[in-house]
């Protein structure tokens, strides 16, 4: 579970963010904070994994608040001011949401929280197996565990995520999906294919065999496969 707090001086922003989070089972709400001072006091005695942070608040601005924290948690910025985006990325923020943002855009930001997790503890591999992402398909949001994905295929304006027991069609670019997947576990092997390392049965010539599927290897992507043998 990802424990989160909301730091924003607007009550309606709290309602929207918490409403979105309630749909995602991996998120666990712990605290409302209506200014950065209140958030700073809360974080002195409590640990959280994620902060949804507005920037233009009274008393102390969002970025100034982050610079004060010694060990800041991961942050998703939510603000109406686009000009702050560059500084936000310089502070290594997970993502930047420009108000008003859609649920689909919100999900993309939350999915990045898992992907950007660089834990190296002995238990990190166990945690990775529990990680997942949400995909919008047929007006629904479907949760898919990384470990269940066999491969991803791009077909026109859609991608097809193939798991051990189903196929999920999503209107996305293959590059966007690649950015959401753990890079040590997934490889792009063709302009239209991403494969899961753990699911590869055989590699023969320019073909990868995964169960009954045959995946082509593109010439420009052959170097990616070298990582399999490192």
Image (cartoon, grey):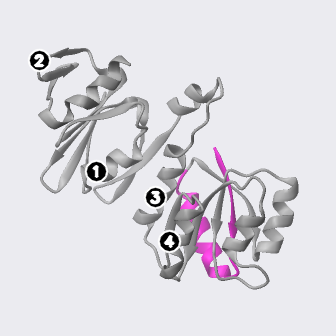
Mark 2 or 3: the one toward you: 2
Quadrant into which the C terminus falls: top left
Which residue was labeled with disc 1? Answer: 175
Q: Which of marks 4 and 3 is in front?
A: 4
Q: How far apart are marks 1 and 4 (CA)?
A: 22 Å
Looking at the image, is mark 3 or mark 1 earlier in the sequence?
3
The CA span between labels 4 and 3 is 21 Å
Callout 3–callout 1 Cβ contact below 8 Å: no
Closest to the camera, between mark 2 and mark 4, is 4
x and y percent of residue 19 in the render? 57, 66
Q: Tell me which segment is drawn in magenta.
A: 1-24
For marks 4 and 3 on the same chain, the one whose residue lies earlier in the sequence: 4
| Cα distance between the residues tagged 2 and 1 | 25 Å
Image coordinates of residue 65 in percent, x first then y, are 74, 70
Residue 188 in which image quadrant? top left
Determine the residue located farthest toward the bottom in the rendered image. 58
Residue located beneath label 3 in the image: 107
| Residue at which label 4 appears | 86
User: Position of 173 compared to 62: left or right?
Assistant: left
> x, y (%) of residue 151?
27, 33
């Amino acid at each position: 579970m990802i424990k989160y707090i909301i730091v924003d001086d607007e009550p309606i922003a709290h309602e929207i963010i918490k409403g979105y989070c309630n749909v995602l089972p991996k998120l666990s709400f712990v605290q409302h904070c209506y200014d950065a001072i209140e958030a700073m006091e809360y974080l002195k005695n409590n640990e959280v994994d994620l902060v949804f942070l507005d920037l233009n608040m009274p008393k102390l601005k969002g970025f100034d608040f982050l610079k004060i924290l010694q060990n800041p948690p991961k942050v998703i910025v939510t603000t109406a001011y686009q000009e702050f985006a560059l500084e936000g990325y310089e502070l290594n923020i997970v993502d930047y949401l420009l108000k008003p943002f859609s649920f689909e855009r919100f999900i993309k930001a939350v999915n990045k929280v898992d992907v950007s997790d660089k834990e190296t503890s002995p238990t990190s591999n166990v945690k990775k197996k529990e990680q997942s992402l949400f995909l919008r398909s047929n007006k629904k949001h479907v949760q898919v565990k990384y470990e269940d994905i066999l491969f991803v295929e791009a077909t026109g304006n859609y991608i097809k995520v193939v798991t051990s027991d189903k196929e999920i069609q999503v209107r996305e670019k293959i590059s966007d999906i690649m950015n959401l997947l753990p890079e040590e576990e997934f490889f792009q092997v063709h302009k239209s294919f991403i494969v899961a390392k753990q699911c590869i049965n055989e590699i023969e010539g320019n073909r990868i065999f995964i169960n009954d599927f045959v995946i082509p290897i593109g010439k420009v992507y052959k170097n990616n496969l070298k990582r399999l043998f490192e």
